[in-house]
Image (cartoon, helix red, strand yellow):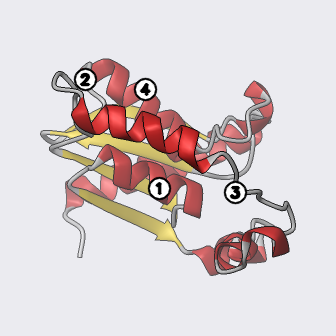
Amino acid sequence: MLTEKQSGFMRLAIEQSRIGMEQGHGGPFGCVIVKDGEVLVATHNKVLSKNDPTAHAEIVAIREACQILDDFQLTGCEIYASCEPCPMCMGAIYWARPDRVFFAANRSDAADAGFDDSFIYEELELEYPDRKIPFVHCLTPAAGEVFQEWKMKEDKTRY
């Protein structure tokens, strides 16, 4: 159950989803990132306005929040998304490491509105050449050398 304040953050995310949709920025998705009980970022999907297929509400919000915090992680933050994050956004969320994610609509609601990402989950289970966009695994030794160099690097920042 959400507190009254958390419900307000979720309503703001839903309001952002409507704003982005009505202004033609993209689909009806909004996101709010909160730290210490205060809104850091409230934004929406910008796929169409930025001609960027990665400009989902959560990705836009994570980028903006990380700039504000001058950090590549969202430690101590909560994410409020108007819809269950897609696989891309979920990956970004895990890399950003917020404390918690709240969402309103779920992936079935999104699919019913024409935003069905179930094919991505299915593609991940397929062998590389069997995917709709074939993936080709190559030059492993050369890439492996760089990973070996990274492992030996003493001044690296882990993330």
Q: Position of residue 39 (x, y in %)?
A: 29, 35
Q: Which amino acid type is shown beneath numbered disc 4?
A: Glu
Quote the CA–CA distance across marks 2 and 3. Answer: 37 Å
Q: Is residue 87 above or below residue 98?
A: below
Residue 65 on image: x %, y %? 35, 29
Check residue 64 in the rendering and tell me which mark sits there, or answer none.
4
Q: Earlier in the sequence, mark 4 or mark 2?
A: 4
Q: Pointer 2: residues within 10 angstroms few (<14), some, or many (20+)?
A: few
Going 85% across and 60% down the picture, which residue do you hit? Answer: 133
Comparing 141 with 16, the one in front is: 141
For image coordinates 77% across by 57% down, the residue present is 136
Name the element at disc 3: loop
The image quadrant where one finds the N terminus is: bottom left
Look at mark 1 in the image and give the residue it sits on. 91
Of the image marks 1 and 4, the number of the one nearer the N terminus: 4
Q: Position of residue 51 (x, y in %)?
A: 80, 29
Mark 4 to mark 3 CA distance (whole Å): 34 Å
Circle 2 or circle 3, nearest the eye? 3
**Gap in Å between the C-alphas at discs 1 and 2?**
20 Å
Quickly name the residue at label 3: 137
